[in-house]
């Protein structure tokens, strides 16, 4: 039984050591600012030393208060004033340097985390909610900033005051110092016991804050859907529950910390009162002077205050350790899609030949379902190939594999004869333009949204791309034309307008490979006709892959690939596939018959 109980305790000790030790992960971000840290340390040592010098001046003043030499008394008062002025100046310098260091390091951490997560493959975001990532970048870094910009320097200053104060207390009165030291164990025990509990509650509190932030981000990101399905009350209730749970945990953390503070301060100052009583008796007996007693009391107060401050800062360090651990998890997160160490280079110029060589793939979140099953296909440079089939057939997966958002479980996807796994991702993606099924519109102007396809493009090129995508007319009618703000996620635009801006973005990219994933699904008949004409023109001389449910948009494709349950079941032109019968013929009959009936 004893052995069974020892194991958990040992595990808890390792956990505690690891939690605090994780703060060392901040050192690489602090290393570039060693001179700033050195200057802050010098200011910190200066202020701590001056704090310890001030009681000596007070002793001189008190012991010489009754002397007849007024010049000597004035000298002591002047010295105390100079020490106070230097202490104030040093504290201001220390605050400025340390706060600047904290802000600089946290800014670097935020950039490093964002740089890491922005390049993670979609599989990462199947496991981690975007809201949680944002919570770590904001809430957790704020905790670290508080520690680096304040708590650490205060802790070091109080540690110096504690050590120096103890030495000077011993020199002032060894007897009273021994009495003070008897109080130390009574103070340390609650710090260790309650501190361990406080660390666990702090970590739980941060987790609930992240969950609340993730829930809010998801609901606000789909606010129109929430409102359309009258789900506001349920969303409010869910967010309220998470927030209240976070508050309850935070209340327990505050309560625990309050208990710790009360216990420590009571024990410390109770000891000071006892020591002061003994010292007063020594003064009455003539063993020590009034000034010596006051000097000792000031040192005792400084030491007690430093112990109390250190107990509070200890809990802050534990919270910062939990925050650092969460950020380190993001910085060290494993990505399943990695660039090769020795990458190959695409032939110049890029022709746009695409090949799927016996590719099989299952999404990590659905390992029992084959998204692609032994798909082999070659698309010649400049060829337009359309992919059709029922939902879940694997059409969009083809598009995702071609951008290497995922790697195949079997086989290889190639561009101009080179496997994508042998290329840098940003190298081959520069040669691909995409129009997704759900167009992504950023909270910026219409011009900036189109220029996202090629940041260096001129205004004339942007407008030409918009005209080719049948977007110029409606953009020109916006309040500020191309400089009109379109709102978060393009909330000020209709679905068709969003799609045309996305198409203009792809046109502007001017890449040899064009991917259209249901690119015209949100357009009305007139806009679809205009955009289709632009796409036909754009696809000339480019390799174009089109995913569509509406067969009318793919009739002119050089080749149509019919997919079902992750397999290619037929290929050919529209007329050939209709003549063969099978799945495509059934889909064509269904759609075109419905179209005629609708007319």
Image: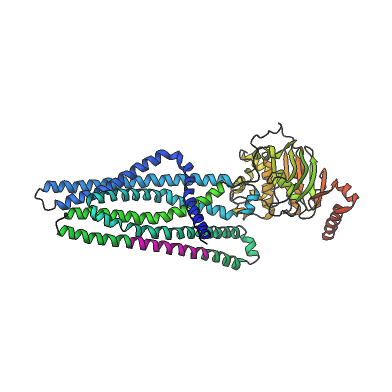
Q: Quadrant of residue 294?
A: bottom left
Can residue 142 be seen in the rendering of this structure? no
Measuring 65% from the left and 64% from the top, which residue is drawn there?
228
Q: Is residue 196 magenta?
A: no
Where does the image place residue 379, in percent across and percent down from the top left? 79, 40
In the rendered image, the residue lying farthest to the right is 579
Instruction: Answer left or right for 44 relative to 216.
Output: left
Q: Is residue 260 magenta?
A: yes
Relative to 45, say whether 173 is above or below.
below
Where does the image place residue 183, in percent across and percent down from the top left? 31, 59
Residue 519 vs residue 408, the one in the foreground: 408
Where does the image place residue 465, in percent across and percent down from the top left? 68, 42
Can residue 148 be seen in the rendering of this structure? yes
If the image is split into quadrants, where does the C terminus sit? bottom right
Magenta segment boundaries in residue numbering: 245-266
Q: Quadrant of residue 542?
A: top right
Residue 19 vs residue 355, the one in the foreground: 19
Instruction: Answer left or right for 591 relative to 443.
Output: right
Q: Considering the whole magenta stretch, tell me its main secondary structure.
A: helix
Residue 177 vs residue 474, the one in the foreground: 177
Instruction: Answer left or right for 404 relative to 129.
Output: right
In the rendered image, the residue lying farthest to the top is 348
Measuring 84% from the left and 55% from the top, which residue is drawn there?
587
Please name the colour scheme applied to the rendered image.
rainbow
Where does the image place residue 54, in percent across and percent down from the top left? 24, 49
């Amino acid at each position: 039984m004893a052995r069974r109980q020892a194991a958990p305790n040992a595990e808890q000790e390792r956990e505690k050591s690891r939690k605090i030790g994780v703060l060392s992960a901040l050192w690489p971000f602090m290393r570039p600012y060693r001179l700033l840290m050195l200057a802050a340390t010098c200011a910190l040592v200066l202020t701590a030393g001056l704090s310890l010098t001030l009681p000596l001046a007070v002793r001189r003043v008190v012991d010489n208060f009754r002397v007849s030499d007024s010049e000597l008394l004035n000298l002591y008062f002047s010295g105390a004033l100079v020490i106070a002025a230097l202490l104030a100046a040093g504290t201001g310098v220390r605050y400025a340097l340390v706060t600047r260091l904290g802000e600089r390091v946290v800014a670097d951490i935020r950039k490093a985390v964002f740089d890491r997560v922005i390049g993670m493959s979609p599989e990462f975001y199947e496991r981690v909610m975007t809201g949680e990532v944002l919570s770590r970048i904001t809430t957790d870094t704020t905790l670290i900033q508080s520690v680096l910009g304040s708590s650490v320097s205060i802790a070091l200053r109080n540690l110096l005051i504690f050590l120096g104060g103890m030495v000077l207390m011993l020199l002032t009165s060894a007897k009273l110092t021994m009495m003070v030291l008897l109080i130390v164990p009574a103070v340390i025990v609650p710090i260790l016991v309650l501190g361990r509990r406080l660390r666990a509650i702090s970590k739980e509190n941060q987790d609930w804050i992240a969950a609340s932030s993730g829930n809010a981000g998801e609901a606000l990101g789909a606010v129109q859907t929430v409102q359309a399905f009258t789900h506001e009350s349920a969303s409010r209730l869910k967010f309220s529950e998470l927030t209240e749970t976070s508050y309850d945990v935070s209340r327990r953390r505050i309560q625990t910390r309050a208990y710790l503070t009360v216990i420590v301060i009571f024990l410390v100052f109770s000891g000071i009162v006892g020591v002061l009583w003994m010292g007063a008796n020594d003064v009455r007996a003539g063993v020590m002077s009034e000034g010596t007693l006051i000097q000792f009391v000031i040192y005792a107060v400084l030491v007690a205050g430093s112990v109390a401050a250190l107990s509070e800062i200890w809990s802050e360090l534990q919270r910062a350790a939990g925050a650092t651990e969460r950020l380190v998890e993001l910085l060290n997160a494993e990505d399943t899609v990695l660039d090769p160490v020795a990458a190959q280079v695409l032939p110049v110029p890029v022709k746009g030949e695409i090949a799927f060589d016996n590719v099989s793939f299952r999404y990590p979140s659905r390992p029992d379902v084959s998204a692609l099953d032994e798909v082999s296909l070659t698309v010649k440079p400049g060829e337009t190939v359309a992919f059709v089939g029922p939902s879940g057939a694997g059409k969009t997966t083809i598009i995702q594999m071609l951008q290497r958002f995922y790697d195949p479980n079997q086989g290889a996807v190639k561009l101009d004869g080179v496997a994508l796994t042998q290329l840098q991702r940003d190298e081959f993606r520069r040669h691909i333009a995409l129009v997704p099924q759900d167009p992504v519109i950023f909270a910026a102007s219409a011009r900036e949204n189109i220029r996202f396809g090629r940041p260096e493009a001129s205004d004339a090129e942007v407008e030409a791309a918009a005209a080719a995508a049948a977007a110029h007319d409606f953009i020109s009618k916006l309040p500020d034309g191309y400089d009109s703000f379109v709102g978060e996620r393009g909330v000020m635009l209709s679905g068709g307008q969003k799609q045309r801006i996305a198409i203009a973005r792809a046109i502007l990219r001017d890449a040899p490979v064009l991917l259209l994933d249901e690119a015209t699904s949100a357009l009305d008949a007139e806009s679809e006709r205009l955009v289709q004409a632009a796409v036909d023109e754009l696809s000339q001389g480019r390799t174009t892959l089109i995913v569509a449910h509406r067969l009318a948009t793919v009739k002119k494709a050089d080749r149509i690939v019919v997919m079902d349950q992750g397999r290619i079941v037929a290929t050919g032109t529209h007329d050939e596939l209709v003549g063969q019968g099978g799945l495509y013929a059934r889909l064509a009959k269904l759609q075109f018959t419905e179209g005629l009936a609708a007319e």
